[in-house]
Amino acid sequence: MSMIKSRLEAFSDGVLAIIITIMVLEMKVPHGENVAVLKPLLPIFLSYILSFSYIGIYWNNHHHMLHATKKISGGVLWANLHLLFWLSLLPFVTGWMGENHFAALPTALYGLVLFMAAIAYWILAHRIIAVEGPESLLAKAIGPDWKGGISVILYALAIPLAFYKQSLSQLIYVSVALMWVIPDTRIERTLIQNEP
Amino acid sequence: MSMIKSRLEAFSDGVLAIIITIMVLEMKVPHGENVAVLKPLLPIFLSYILSFSYIGIYWNNHHHMLHATKKISGGVLWANLHLLFWLSLLPFVTGWMGENHFAALPTALYGLVLFMAAIAYWILAHRIIAVEGPESLLAKAIGPDWKGGISVILYALAIPLAFYKQSLSQLIYVSVALMWVIPDTRIERTLIQNEP
Amino acid sequence: MSMIKSRLEAFSDGVLAIIITIMVLEMKVPHGENVAVLKPLLPIFLSYILSFSYIGIYWNNHHHMLHATKKISGGVLWANLHLLFWLSLLPFVTGWMGENHFAALPTALYGLVLFMAAIAYWILAHRIIAVEGPESLLAKAIGPDWKGGISVILYALAIPLAFYKQSLSQLIYVSVALMWVIPDTRIERTLIQNEP
Amino acid sequence: MSMIKSRLEAFSDGVLAIIITIMVLEMKVPHGENVAVLKPLLPIFLSYILSFSYIGIYWNNHHHMLHATKKISGGVLWANLHLLFWLSLLPFVTGWMGENHFAALPTALYGLVLFMAAIAYWILAHRIIAVEGPESLLAKAIGPDWKGGISVILYALAIPLAFYKQSLSQLIYVSVALMWVIPDTRIERTLIQNEP
């Protein structure tokens, strides 16, 4: 395994592991020991589940994309940091959306961060293809990335929709997440890994 | 070592390392410099020791299970994230149980998180076996996992018990932890690792 | 890959990943759901972008330097920790500068931390060269490090300038960051990594 | 490199990287932009430097010890977690000592955590030797560990001394740290690492 690629992965894994874990800190330990003190935490908990799933999806996709990658350039390193930047804002918008019971503006901002992260992922994929070449394994594997494209369009719709009817935006965020998770867990072909 | 498996381990290690460390942040630095300000921290400290042990046990078991694993599927990746999700709630319930001096509801919720994590671990083990095959080294190594089974039953008992007598639930949590730690530290057969 | 070097990298990656991620915690989730509550967060957000870029630059340079390194001494380990120490102060000065809308003293202190980190990086590079020898690949690759030198001089200028006109110091911090990021993303030569 | 050992290292690196970094969170970003608001942070900053050095020393020693280790047992895994447990308390006692301007009780408790961590390190070393055998490279390398022994004795002295004259305890903590750092940075023999 090339060193630079392994450090890119290790650094990304570290950042994603921290993002996924510090989000739980937004669920502040309440004062009191009855069910009533837990109730205001419910929307924060729900938004935590949503964001946890999104970080999981990004980790998963990131990892498959880099698995097929052979060469790394300076541009790829920065495109990767750009993606991590938008994902690092997820704990903030998750907490804000949860604390305000999925109000319009926080819901729209949540969608904006998802939108920017999806764009950043697209840039990263294309910087890698630019280095690997259009005939590379990766370019073929990504192909016409319809799932990524649909996600971006749906996020773009969800942002203005939040000011009209928030629940529709929430429905979009949940549906996009399910669209990524379900086929992944069902997938029959295992990625057989033999020890070298 | 296969790359995908190594990233699964690296990501899990990162998340577990962060969970185990941010739990200590629940022990807020007190104002004042005498013994009296430390006293209210004692139950938080005790629950920290308990949760630290549980994360240690999970890290340990996770690591043995993956050591014997050869193939990773999409389902395994998500089963692993599902386990990390429940474990990521441990800092929250640890803080809540500690701050409320092991009251009934926080004690029951603590048990629920342990219960769900144990179920998630069981799902992960069986997703791996489904990929590896019933004749695999792993399937034989796990065998009829009586220790895991007993733990799940005991957690299930401890949840309702907390509303009757909390100290019994606490006793169960401590006993299950000891059941996992003690044989592990006593084990005579060393896992001899030769450099490749 | 030598083990000691790989652990030095892993530890540094871990610390840098945590620094870059905990900085976002300075953007406290606001109470209220309208645009007005986001406004005071704008300077904190801008200083977050700046510091995120700086940690990215350091991670990038650190990683290229160690890629060309073969031998590690005790002095190198400590020079590396010294660099991480100054970078670990970045979240603090970032938060302080952001919360005080880029006031004079926080701006100067931010420059001081950048200055000390640049000096620490220089020390690390020279400790590595001392071990590797003046004829090593690394010594030649670093050569007369004009970009590092210019950065140090500019930081040294920005510190007193902050008390005269803060915006000039800010301009310096942004310009130095761009000086590092832009050529890196444009670079044509890819660092071709072949699997071993 | 054996997988189990590498995960033990990766997990320990993760925990130590987080401990060293979250300690900086005890330096809360002050309100106000003048020198006066920084003054109360000075003792917290000084205790941060001290604890940063101690985590650096432990990381360094841990890494040398495991470098010479070939075999890992269940007992070693738990002895390692036991060490990490005591080190995870360092951010708490660092913050408490710093906030109370090095008062007697916090200073004594800081010494107690250092003492327990040193004992835990000793236990870890001897669990590893028990597995490796008395004729192993590691057993010879550790030999009669006079530096570890002196440190433990000095910590044991510093704890009661804190109630008599805190500055003496502080002097001991600083001296022990210097005793570990200085020879390490001066060391002439480089640990030459050849690519495998």
Image (spheres, coloured by chain):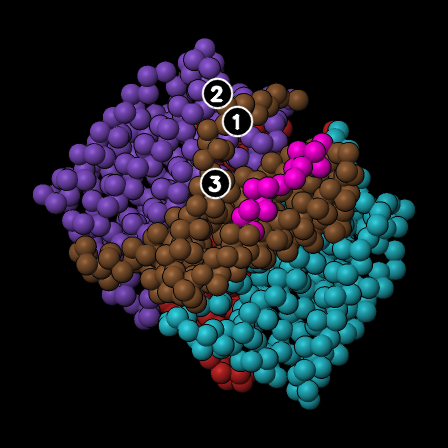
Chain colours: A cyan, B brown, C red, D purple
Alpha carbons under labels 1 and 2: distance apart? 7 Å
Residue holding disc 3: B179
**Image coords of residue D151 (percent x, y):** 26, 30
Residue holding disc 2: D131
- Residue at 49 percent across and 61 percent down: it is B159
**Image coords of residue D33 (percent x, y):** 33, 69
**Image coords of residue D31 (percent x, y):** 33, 70
- Whether residue B107 is visible to the viewer of this picture, yes or no, is yes
Which chain does the residue under circle 2 lie in? D
Alpha carbons under labels 3 and 2: distance apart? 23 Å
- Residue at 82 percent across and 64 percent down: it is A147
Magenta residue span = B137-152
Give the position of the N terminus of chain D as an image quadrant.
top right
Position of residue B48 in the picture relative to residue C18 (left or right)? left
Q: Secondary structure at mark 1?
A: loop
Vertical order, C38 against C95 (above or below): below
Alpha carbons under labels 1 and 3: distance apart? 21 Å
Q: Secondary structure at mark 3?
A: helix
Amino acid type of the residue tagged 2 in the rendering: Val
Residue holding disc 1: D72
Numbered badge on residue C40 = none
> Answer yes or no: do the residues labelled 1 and 2 have beta carbons within 8 Å?
yes
- Residue at 49 percent across and 77 percent down: it is A40
